[in-house]
Amino acid sequence: MISETTSTDPFAPLPHDARLWIFGTDRPLDASEEARLLDAVDSFLDAWQAHGKELAAARDWREGRFLMVAVDESVAPPTGCSIDALRRLIQGMERELDVEMVGGGPVWYRDAADGGAVRRVSRTEFREAAATGEITADTSVFDPALVRLADLREGKWERRAAEGWHARLLP
């Protein structure tokens, strides 16, 4: 894992082209669950390697729902096996915390009617809410499919539904 910086952005030392993974939870975690998840991820990242080379990686936790992991591929690129190890860690934490973080293709958005709370719904539920006007082109949505840190830094993670792939789900 990369060394700590004085910045509040844990990704500050990483380049724009760093590889990014975003895992969103199906429900908010309580403080104890959050601590267990982040402790496990920190321990994993401290020892994360690809073919015996330490990976320069960092993580962030946002909105009480999103785990982000980034790695500087110019230092040492992650391999299929090292990426699988990350996924196994996340899947193990899913079982331990009884939470879903991998798969399913859900949609996350801010519910304006509930003070901006983050909601997770299926694509079908998102379409239905859009059809009734509960969700509009201006609804703030999250895109966990980003793969580069530059996209996160450029504001593509949270934006209006009309500005991303979510637009296909709007009427």
Image (cartoon, rainbow, N blue to C red):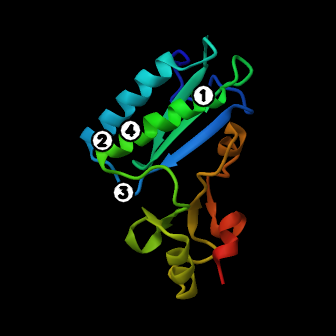
- Screen quadrant of the C terminus: bottom right
Q: Which residue is mark 4?
A: 92
Mark 3 highlights which residue?
27
Whichever of callouts 3 and 1 sits on the residue coming sooner in the sequence is: 3
Q: How many marks?
A: 4
**Horizontal side of residue 66 vs 82, given as left or right:** left
Q: Is residue 15 above or below residue 53?
A: below
Q: Specify which label sits upstream in the sequence, 1 or 4.
A: 1
Distance between the alpha carbons at the discs numbered 1 and 2: 22 Å
Judging from the image, what secondary structure is the residue with disc 2 in?
helix
Query: x, y percentage for residue 87?
Result: 51, 38
Q: CA distance from mark 3 to mark 1?
A: 29 Å
What residue is shown with label 1? 81
Alpha carbon distance from label 4 to label 2: 6 Å
Q: Nearer the viewer, mark 4 or mark 3?
A: 4
Query: Callout 4, which amino acid?
Result: Gly
**Residue ranking furthest to the left:** 32
The quadrant where residue 17 appears = top right
Instruction: Residue type at mark 3: give it.
Output: Arg
| Residue at the image position 49 percent from the left and 16 percent from the top | 47
CA gap between label 1 and label 4 equals 16 Å
Query: Residues at badges 3 and 1 in contact (C-beta under 8 Å)?
Result: no
Marks 2/3: CA distance? 14 Å
Between 156 and 56, the residue placed more toward the observer is 56
Question: Which dot, 1 or 2, sits closer to the camera?
Answer: 1
First reached walking from the N terminus: tag 4 or tag 3: 3
SS category of the residue bearing label 3: loop
Could you tell me if the residues under marks 2 and 3 are in contact, i.e. CB atoms within 8 Å?
Answer: no
CB under 8 Å between discs 4 and 2: yes
Mark 1 crowdedness (10 Å alpha carbons): few <14, some 14-19, many ≥20:
few
The residue lying at 65 percent from left, 68 percent from top is 166
Read off the residue under disc 2: 96
